[in-house]
Image: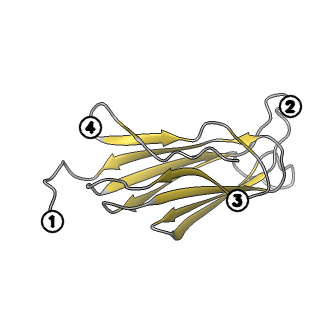
């Protein structure tokens, strides 16, 4: 079972927020690693960083992981990480950004090819505008 973050932590500066999954064990099932129910009342640029699976006991092993990002239940990005695949030159980490309008739902799901290792996911949100009054 993946770790799911249903809330985010506001930066002390008020310029944005962050959230992270921590180490999530690989399994072949689809699991939510980050869930934001509501991004708030400000438009936001989100930056997502995902890492491929590793095993601390043996750093030469890993598996293929796929991370899919959903914005308001629409898949907008899928990233495949093949850690330690000797036949393919794949990165073990990927970072991408996307725009999330105010009051959006964001979800990141992870799926793995086997049960080798664990992956991590982190997001950072940068507000696009200063705070504005709520409108009805």
Q: Which residue is disc 2 drawn over?
A: 58
Q: Secondary structure at mark 1?
A: loop
Report x, y in % for residue 67: 64, 57
Report x, y in % for residue 70: 52, 64
Give whichever of 119, 61 is nearer the camera.
Answer: 119
Q: Which residue is disc 3 drawn over?
A: 30
Q: Secondary structure at mark 2?
A: loop
Q: Earlier in the sequence, mark 3 or mark 4?
A: 4
From the viewer's perspective, is 43 left or right of 56?
A: left
Q: Secondary structure at mark 4?
A: loop
Residue 129 higher or lower than 100, as above or below: above
From the viewer's perspective, is 124 left or right of 41?
A: right
Residue that sits furthest to the top in the current view: 57
Of the two numbered discs 4 and 1 in the rendering, the one whose residue sits closer to the viewer: 1
Give whichever of 57, 92 is nearer the camera.
Answer: 57
Q: Which residue is disc 4 drawn over?
A: 14
Q: Tell me the tag on residue 102.
A: none
* Residues under numbered marks 4 and 1 in contact, where contact means CB atoms less than 8 Å apart: no
Q: Which residue is disc 1 drawn over?
A: 136
């Amino acid at each position: 079972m993946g770790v799911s973050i249903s809330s985010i932590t506001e930066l002390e500066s008020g310029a944005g927020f962050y959230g992270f999954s921590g180490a999530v064990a690989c399994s072949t099932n689809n699991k939510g690693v980050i869930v934001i129910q509501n991004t708030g009342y400000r438009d936001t640029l989100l930056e997502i960083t995902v890492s491929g699976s590793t095993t601390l006991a043996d750093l030469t092993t890993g598996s293929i992981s796929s991370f899919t990002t959903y914005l308001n239940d629409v898949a907008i990005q899928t990233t495949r990480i093949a850690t330690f695949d000797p036949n393919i030159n794949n990165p073990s980490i990927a970072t991408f950004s996307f725009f999330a309008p105010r009051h959006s739902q964001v979800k990141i799901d992870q799926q793995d090819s086997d049960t080798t290792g664990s992956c991590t996911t982190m997001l950072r949100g940068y507000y696009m505008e200063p705070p504005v009054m709520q409108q009805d």
